[in-house]
Image (cartoon, helix red, strand yellow):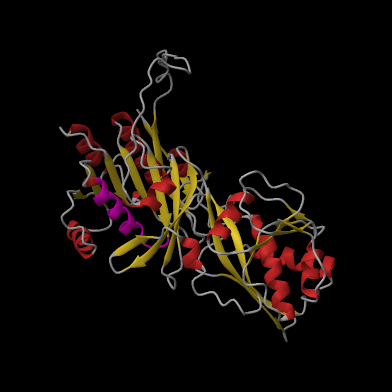
């Protein structure tokens, strides 16, 4: 007779334990281990049936079939997904509660449904009337989207497989509310989330349905549930932003059909999320050019160059351990830049409170921001504004050297388009033909950046 097997699974990291304990030894989380039924094991001597042989084909193939993408018409959303949704693909989008995930997806689904694309929106958190109220508030009440309020995966899959008209797009909001009734565990647990996603993805890929999952996030900002969920899907998007800012950033951290680290910029308005086609001009709209400690960074997010303002404030501290507050950047990298400026340039920053902010609510993750941060810190410590029409980018090493970064020509082109006339860039790389005609100050060491404030001449290239 089949024997039920029970395991104790951590709901934070998905690791399996032989018995219950208060702390997970894998991720050090407390009270996260729960008992779950994994499977019913077959009696000994059974279950030894040999598998059938699978058909092997060549890499080149004999068919040149190419699936057209489902283009929503929302430019920022299509940019992040790599040009639209691919039939048979699975996309996972996560973000903080109330950031606008459901609003963005409802806008995308309504835009697609108006292009004779059959779209189904399944909500496990809201009723049908709640979804309709949001659609009417956004002016999308007349869109031909089909709605359902369901949480049983087998019912959803049966509906998709038995329909006469094929479904092109399926939205599951959210995957943590879905469950399979053959598994003896609550919705949202590791086993339920993993198995539910596998079943929906299997049915979607069989019938060429593009499926979008909405995922909850933990207090650390990671998508809740097992890490294998991000491996199952083809694309993982994070919806970022501060509630105090109207800007929202849609970032691709995994994409099998397009570039990773691509971002789309939206603005939260009364009519929903409005795409921002020129985010650089928007982020610099309220910049104070005469303020000390303000520099402009030419960053690169995915394939898009973006200009953002880096603000630094250096103030004397009466505390034994001065404060280091950072918004929009890596605090560990700020500590490294401060140490390099003290050791290699002789700046006295150890006894000062340092506050750093990337204006606009955007988060910068690339090391090319090192030079702009260093320039802002030097300007703030000396109380001298930077040249208002200058941009900075470059990576700083522990020896104080300024290293090259990717795609400098694209950064300079974006800066030139917005009216900037001077750039401070790493030395050593010759400009290619077709590069924007912008005067550039080349520096090879961070000491040369400090010398610029002492009036010393630095080598320039046209």
Q: Which residues are magenta?
A: 96-112
Residue 119 visible in the current orientation:
yes
Q: Quadrant of residue 401?
A: bottom right
Q: Is residue 110 magenta?
A: yes
Residue 121 locus on image (x, y percent): 24, 49
Q: Is residue 269 above or below residue 59?
A: below
| Residue nearest the viewer, comparing 39 with 109 | 109
Residue 67 locus on image (x, y percent): 34, 30
Q: Is residue 158 above or below residue 435?
A: above
Q: Is residue 13 magenta?
A: no
Q: State left or right for residue 448 relative to residue 270.
A: right
Q: State left or right for residue 271 relative to residue 410.
A: left
Query: Looking at the image, which residue is at 42% across and 48% down?
Result: 79
Residue 321 visible in the current orientation:
no
Quarter holding the C terminus? bottom right
Query: Looking at the image, which residue is at 50% across and 51% down?
Result: 20
């Amino acid at each position: 007779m089949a024997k039920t097997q029970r395991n104790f699974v951590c709901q934070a990291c998905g690791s399996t334990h032989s018995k219950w304990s208060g702390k997970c030894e894998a991720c050090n989380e407390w009270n996260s281990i729960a008992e779950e039924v994994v499977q019913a094991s077959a009696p000994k001597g059974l279950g030894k049936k040999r598998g059938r042989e699978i058909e092997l084909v060549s890499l080149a193939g004999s068919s040149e079939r190419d699936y057209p993408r489902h283009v929503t018409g929302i430019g920022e959303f299509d940019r992040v997904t790599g040009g639209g949704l691919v039939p048979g693909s699975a996309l996972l989008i996560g973000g903080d509660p109330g950031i606008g995930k459901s609003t963005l997806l409802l806008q995308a689904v309504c835009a697609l449904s108006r292009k004779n694309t059959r779209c189904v929106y399944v909500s496990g958190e809201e009723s049908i009337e709640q979804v309709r109220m949001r659609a009417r508030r956004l002016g999308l009440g007349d869109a031909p989207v089909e709605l359902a309020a369901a949480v049983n995966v087998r019912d959803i899959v049966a509906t998709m497989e038995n329909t006469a008209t094929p479904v092109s797009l399926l939205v599951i909001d959210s995957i943590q509310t879905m469950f399979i009734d053959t598994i003896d565990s609550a919705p949202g647990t590791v086993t339920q989330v993993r198995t539910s996603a596998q079943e929906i993805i299997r049915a979607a890929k069989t019938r060429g349905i593009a499926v979008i999952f909405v995922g909850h996030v933990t207090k650390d900002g990671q998508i809740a549930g097992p890490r294998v969920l991000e491996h199952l899907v083809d694309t993982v998007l994070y919806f970022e932003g501060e509630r105090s800012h109207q800007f929202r950033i849609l970032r691709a951290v995994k994409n099998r059909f397009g570039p990773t680290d691509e971002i789309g910029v939206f603005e939260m308005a009364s009519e929903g999320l409005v795409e921002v086609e020129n985010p650089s001009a928007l982020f610099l709209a309220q910049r104070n050019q005469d303020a000390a400690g303000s520099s402009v960074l030419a960053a690169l997010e995915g394939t898009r160059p973006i200009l953002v303002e880096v603000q630094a404030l250096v103030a004397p501290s009466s505390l034994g351990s001065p404060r280091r507050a950072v918004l929009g950047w890596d605090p560990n990298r700020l500590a490294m830049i401060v140490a390099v400026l003290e050791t290699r340039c002789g700046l006295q920053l150890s006894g000062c409170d340092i506050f750093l902010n990337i204006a606009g609510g955007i988060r910068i993750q690339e090391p090319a921001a090192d030079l702009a941060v260093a320039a802002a810190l030097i300007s703030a410590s000396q109380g001298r504004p930077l040249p208002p029409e200058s941009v900075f980018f470059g990576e700083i090493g522990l020896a104080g050297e300024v290293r090259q970064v990717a795609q400098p020509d694209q950064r300079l082109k974006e800066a030139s388009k917005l009216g900037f006339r001077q750039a401070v860039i790493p030395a050593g790389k010759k400009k290619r033909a077709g590069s924007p005609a912008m005067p550039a100050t080349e520096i090879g060491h961070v000491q040369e950046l400090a010398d610029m404030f002492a009036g010393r001449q630095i080598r320039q290239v046209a």
